[in-house]
Amino acid sequence: MPTKDLLNRQHPNPAQLCAFLPSMRVLSVSDFVSLVNETLKALSEADVFAVEGEVSQYRVSQGQWVSFDLKDDQALVNVFLPVWKLGVPLEDGMKVRVYGLGRVYPKYGKFSLSAEKIELVGEGALRKALAALRLRLEKEGLFDPSRKRVLPRFPARVALIASRESAAYGDIIRILDERWGGLDIDLYHVLVQGVRAAEDVMSALRQAQDGAYDVIVITRGGGSLEELMPFNDEALVRAVRASRIPTLIAIGHERDITLAEEAADVRGSTPTDCARLLVPDRRDVIYELASLTGGIERSLQQQLDAWRDILDRAVLAPGAWVTGRIAQADALVSAASAAMDAWFRSLQETLRAHTRLFATLDPSAVLKRGYAILRDAGGKPLTSVARLRIGQQATVALKDGDAGVAVTRLGKQTIQPTML
Amino acid sequence: MSTVKKESKEVDVAKGFQELEDIAGWFERGETDLEKGLEKFERAMQVADVLKKRLAAAENRVKDIKKKYEAGS
C-alpha cells in the first residue's frame, strides 16, 4: 500500500506505519527531549534571532529566578533566566526583545526561552527604564539643587558643545549676537543623535575641562524620546555632574527633560532660552549702568549742596557777629563821642574864658584902657611904690608911646575899686 | 590647568560693575569727605566709560575646536 494512502487515512495503524517509515526510530523521553533541545540549539547558532513580544506574568522566585511570559496576540512562550542576567528593569506590559535559546526543561517537560540578553523596545519601555535610572541617580544626589552652581553674570569665554549643522546652533548664535557682544565662543562640533552621540559629547566635555571657560553649554534641538536617549546615558549624565566648569544644557523640547539637563547646573528649555540664560541683554546692562552713574552724580551733587550749606552758614555767622560787634562798637563810640563832645565843649569854654582872661591881661589891652605901665631903666615893670626911690629915673608907657620920668614924691595909697 | 590666556585688553565687566556699585554705596553712606567724593566720582565716570565701550561691542567670536578625537573614526 502506498505511504501516502496510509497517511491520508484517518486512523492509520501505527504498526503498519512503522513498517513503511524507514528512518523512524524509538526514543526514550529523555532522548527525545535532548533531540529537541539539540535541534533548537542548532537553529539558534545557524541563524541569530531574537524574539520580540510583550511581558506578562512577570515574577521573580526566591530572589534568583526571573520568569515571565513573552506574548503576542496569538501565542506566548515562557521566558526564564537568572536575575543577574537581567540588565533592564522589567514590568508587565513592556515590549522587549529576548535573545536566547529555546529549550525544553527535561524535568518538567516545559518549553521555555532561556534568555541570555533582554533589550527594551519602544517608547513605553524606554520611559520606564529611564524612570528607574532617574530614581537611582536622584538617590545618589546627582540632581541635588544645592549642588548646582550659579552662572557668572558676564561670561567672557564659553565652550559650546553642539552640532554645527543643527538649527539649535544657528538659533543660539543668533540670539547671543542680538543680546550681547564680545563673547569668545569655542565650538565643539559633536553628533547629537545615534549610538555614538553619548561618547562624542562626553569626549568634548572632557576636553573642555582644560579650557578657561566660564560656562560649558550643551545644546540640541527637540526630538523623540529615542532620538534624545544619548542625553539620558548614565556615563554622560555623571560626566555632566562632575564637570569642574558650570554647565548650561538645553535640549529643545518640553515634554521630557533629559537626565543630562537635570544634572546640569542650569537647564534651558530651548536653545534660544539658553542664550538668554547665558548672557544679559546689553540694553538692560546699559540702562543699569546709566542708573548707577546717575545715582553717583546725584549723590555727589547732594554732597556739594551739603557743603555749600555749611559754607553759607559759616559765612553768615561771622557777619552776624561782626554786625553785633559793630553795633556794640558803634554804641561805645557814640557814647565816647558824646562824652568827648561835652568835654571838648567845656574845654573850648575854658579856653575861651582863658582867652578872655588873657585878653584882659594883655598889657596892650591894659594900656588901651588908659592905664600906664612904669618900667625901670632895665625895662622891668615897677609894680610897687616900695621899690621906688625919689629921683629914680623910669619910663612910663602909655597907649600911644612912652616918656622918661623921675620920681619926685612917694606916698602909700590903697587901691580904690573903680568902675571899669 | 588653563592653557588659554585671556586677552589683556579684555574688560572684566563684572569687576567694573562691582567697582561702580561700591562707589555708589560709599556715597549712599552719607560720607562728607568732599575731596574723596570728587575722586570717587571721577573714577566712577572712568569705569563707566570703559564699560560703555565694552557694551557697545557688537559681535561674538566663534572658534571651531579640533576635538582630540573625532567621532566615527
Image: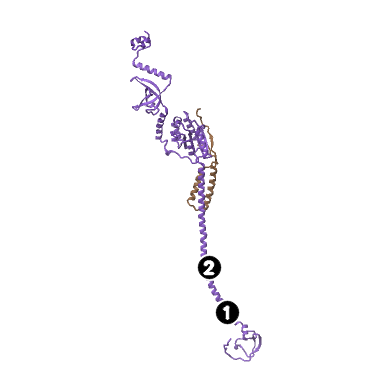
Q: Which type of secondary structure does the marked residue at label 2 adopt?
A: helix
Residue at 41%, 18% (x, y): give it.
A43
- Which residue type does callout 1 highlight? His
Q: With A16 as the anchor, is A284 left or right in this view?
A: right
* Residue at mark 2: A330
Cβ atoms at labels 2 and 1 below 8 Å apart: no
Looking at the image, residue A35 lies above or below residue A188? above
Measuring from the top left, give residue A330's x and y in whole percent. 53, 68
Crowding at label 1, few (<14), some or many (≥20) Cα neighbours within 10 Å?
A: few
Q: Quadrant of the N terminus of chain A?
A: top left
In the rendered image, the vertical position of residue A305 relative to residue A99, given as above or below: below
Q: Position of residue A191 (x, y in %)?
A: 49, 30
Q: Colour of chain A?
A: purple
Q: Which residue is mark 1?
A: A354
Is A237 displayed left or right of B5 in the figure?
A: left
Mark 2 is surrounded, within 10 Å at the Cα level, by few (under 14), some (14 to 19) or many (20 or more) other residues, namely few
Residue occupying the far top of the picture: A1
Q: Mark 2 or 1, which is nearer the eye? A: 2
Position of the C terminus of chain A by quadrant: bottom right
Of the chain colours in the picture, the one used for chain B is brown
Under mark 2, the amino acid is: Asp
